[in-house]
Amino acid sequence: MIDDRWVFYKDVEAKDMGGGVTRRVLAYSKDLMCVENSFEKGAIGALHHHPHTQITYIVSGAFEFEIDGVKKVVRAGDTMLKTNDVVHGCVCLEKGVLLDIFNPMREDFV
């Protein structure tokens, strides 16, 4: 829940987003949100945009990301900055996990 100081992974149920993607909303406040997304190989994060600044950290796997019309392959340890309303999306090349940080929080996720 919002403003919980402690969020234990074992207590957060993964939500099936369909198409081989699951989402876990982790710690968040009105100003900041941490979200884990797990992708099966071949799963797609459709091109979209939103009025939030987003940083994505690649925890594991490999992904082809498109940000503002530019495509690059990213792997564990890489990060990407997606500023407000920039169009972005991805294709999972190797099963993996993304950690997304949003400012402000994504109200549509809770």
Image (spheres, rainbow, N blue to C red):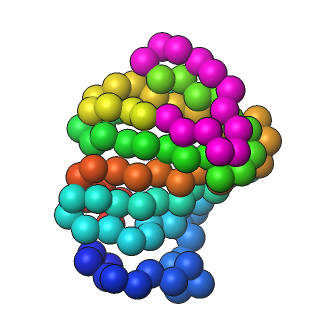
Quadrant in the picture for the C terminus: bottom left
Question: Percent position (x, y) of residue 5?
Answer: 34, 83
Q: Is residue 15 visible?
A: yes
- Position in image of residue 1 (x %, y %): 32, 79
With 25 as the anchor, is 40 left or right in this view?
right
Residue ranking furthest to the front: 77
Number of on-image labels: 0
Q: Position of residue 2 (x, y in %)?
A: 27, 75
Q: Residue 22 is drawn in which quadrant?
A: bottom right
Report whether residue 44 is seen. no
| Magenta-colored stretch includes residue 4 | no
Please tell me which residue is depicted at 44% across the width and 70% down the height of the picture.
26
Q: Residue at x 27, y 33 (%)?
A: 84
Residue at point 46%, 60% (across, down) = 35
Q: What's the magenta bit mostly, secondary-structure-wise?
A: strand
Q: Is residue 14 left or right of residue 35?
A: right
Tell me: residue 32, above or below residue 50.
below
Relative height, residue 52 to residue 101 (above, below): above
Span highlighted in magenta in the image: 68-80
Q: Is residue 73 magenta?
A: yes
In front: 42, or 67? 67
Hey, which residue is sitting farthest left in the picture? 30
Left or right, 54 with reference to 19:
left
| Rendering coords of residue 87 (x, y %) | 39, 25
Q: Residue at x 27, y 42 (%)?
A: 52
In this image, 34 relative to 72: left or right?
Answer: left
Relative to 95, does residue 46 appear above or below in the rendering?
Answer: above
Q: Quadrant of residue 108?
A: bottom left
